[in-house]
Image (cartoon, helix red, strand yellow):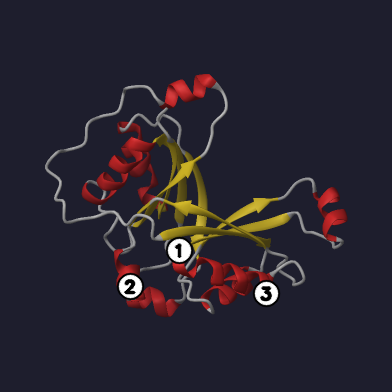
Amino acid sequence: MIGLSLIVTIVKKKLSEKFIDFFKEFGSTTVLSSGCRGTATSVILDYLGLDKSEKNILFTVVREDVSKKILKELVYSMDIDVPGVGIGMSIPLNSICAQSIMAFVEQENVLSVSSGMKEEKKIMENQYSLIIAIANVGCTDMVMDAARSANAGGGTIIHAKGVGFDKSEKFFGISLSSEKEMIFIVTLTKDKNNIMKAIINNAGMKTEAQSIVISVPVDGVVGLRSLETNLE
């Protein structure tokens, strides 16, 4: 059976409709969109030539073979590797329920990708991970300060609301706020463990942030050209 991937794309808000239309060209009729904001400091923004424009984060599920084509076309057709445009990544999915959904995702309505692509532009694979920290509202600076102390770059923040905190409070033995912020941090896999430990130690459950931290593998990333240069 063909595997599935979750495509996550973070772009300027004014470009989101253009990217949604792009995904539809690849047969993705369902794209989830949410507003978000970045965490990069003014020094980093000035270095990369970026601004603090509003952003949207887009989610869509596609076949694994299609995800690789999409990442390539994000570079060649959407110029996502141009500083300030955005970032795209694919996350492998282990399972999906409902046969009708699976059949829909596997339908053969995907447009072919141009064969004239230049091979020298490689998608960076197996080098990145996505860290997701869930923290109390107003504590993102605490989380990002901890992450940056372990060599993290910037992050993307999404506002969220927690549910079912009665049982969680009994489990952790502390009061939990229902208002949350999710911080998405794309990092080099070699730095993942140190970043997660830094967040737990400096912004974990025993702090005001009360952060919970998870990570997922990323099997393809585009749009990090400037950040890669900076990390080197």
In this figure, which residue is indicated by the disc labeled 1? 189
193 shown above or below 89? below
Give residue 133's position: percent from left, percent from top: 61, 61
Tell me the CA gap for discs 3 and 2.
Answer: 30 Å
Classify mark 3: helix, strand or loop: helix
The residue lying toward the viewer, choosing from 115 and 13, is 115
Q: Nearer the viewer, mark 1 or mark 2?
A: 1
Classify mark 2: helix, strand or loop: helix
- The type of residue carrying mark 3 is Asn
Classify mark 1: helix, strand or loop: helix
Tell me the CA gap for discs 1 and 3.
Answer: 19 Å
How dense is the environment of label 3, judged by Cα within 10 Å: few (below 14), some, or many (20 and up)?
Answer: some
- The type of residue carrying mark 1 is Thr
- The type of residue carrying mark 2 is Leu
Position of the N terminus, as image quadrant, is top left
In this figure, which residue is indicated by the disc labeled 3? 201
Residue 48 is labelled as 2
174 shown above or below 150? above
Point out the tag, 3 or 2, that comes first from the N-terminus. Answer: 2
Point out the tag, 1 or 3, that comes first from the N-terminus. Answer: 1
The residue sitting at 44% across, 35% down in the picture is 4
Asked whether disc 1 touches disc 2, contact meaning CB atoms under 8 Å apart, the reply is no
Give residue 62's position: percent from left, percent from top: 41, 35
The residue sitting at 75% across, 66% down in the picture is 205
Give residue 89's position: percent from left, percent from top: 40, 51
